[in-house]
């Protein structure tokens, strides 16, 4: 984080690259294009201890989630506001995970990397 404060949400803007959940699916920016996941996304923001921050835990279905208005190849993701803004400090580490890797399941056939710009909204 670049400054201290109470963070409400974050926005990720796609810059380059792609990810895929297995070699039989086409690549995407934010998730797995396997029909079993539908339009669910798998890009998860955690704290340094790998605890999910965004999307909020109540929105997660194990390692994927729906984000209305966004799909696998949206040029940006804007998460909904946290009910209770998160106190963050300058230089606090946040991590961006691919869902299957985050839960340590089904990741052996994952490939790729997506690069993003990250923005945070504060109270």
Image (spheres, grey):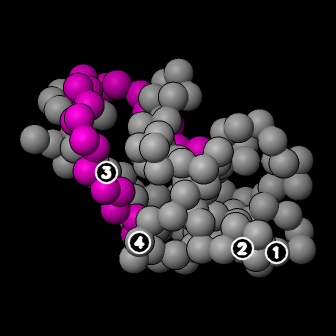
* In this picture, residue 107 sits left or right of residue 2: right
- Which residue does the numbered mark 2 point to in the structure image? 33
Instruction: Tell me: 46 left or right of 20.
Output: left
Q: Secondary structure at mark 1?
A: loop
- Dividing the picture into quarters, in which one does residue 2 lie? top left
Q: Earlier in the sequence, mark 4 or mark 2?
A: 2
Q: Which residues are magenta?
A: 75-97
In this view, the mark in front (4 or 2): 4
Q: Is residue 114 visible?
A: no
Q: Are marks 1 and 2 in contact (CB under 8 Å)?
A: yes
Work out whether 72 lies above or below 114. Answer: below
Frontmost residue, 68 versus 47: 68
Are the two marked residues, 1 and 3, in contact with CB atoms closer than 8 angstroms?
A: no
Between the C-alphas of marks 1 and 2, the distance is 6 Å
- Can you say whether 80 is above or below 123 in the image? below
Residue receiving disc 3: 10
Q: Mark 4 and mark 2: span between their CA atoms?
A: 17 Å
Q: Earlier in the sequence, mark 3 or mark 4?
A: 3
Q: Which residue is mark 4?
A: 68
Answer above or below: position of 72 versus 4. below
Q: Position of residue 115 (x, y in %)?
A: 53, 58
Name the secondary structure under disc 2. loop
CA gap, disc 2 and disc 3: 23 Å
Seen at 44% across and 65% down, the residue is 67
Give the label, 3 or 4, closer to the camera: 4
Q: Which residue is mark 1?
A: 25
Of 81 and 101, nearer the camera is: 81
């Amino acid at each position: 984080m670049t400054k201290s404060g109470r963070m409400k949400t974050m926005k990720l803007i796609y810059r380059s690259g792609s990810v895929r959940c297995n070699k039989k699916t086409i690549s995407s920016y934010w998730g797995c294009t396997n029909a079993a996941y539908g339009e669910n996304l798998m890009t998860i923001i955690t704290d340094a201890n790998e605890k999910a921050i965004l999307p909020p835990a109540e929105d997660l279905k194990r390692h994927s989630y729906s984000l209305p208005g966004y799909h696998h190849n949206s040029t940006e993701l804007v998460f909904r506001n946290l009910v209770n803004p998160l106190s963050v400090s300058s230089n606090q580490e946040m991590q961006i995970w691919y869902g299957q890797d985050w839960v340590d399941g089904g990741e052996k056939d994952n490939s790729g990397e997506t690069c993003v710009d990250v923005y945070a909204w504060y109270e």
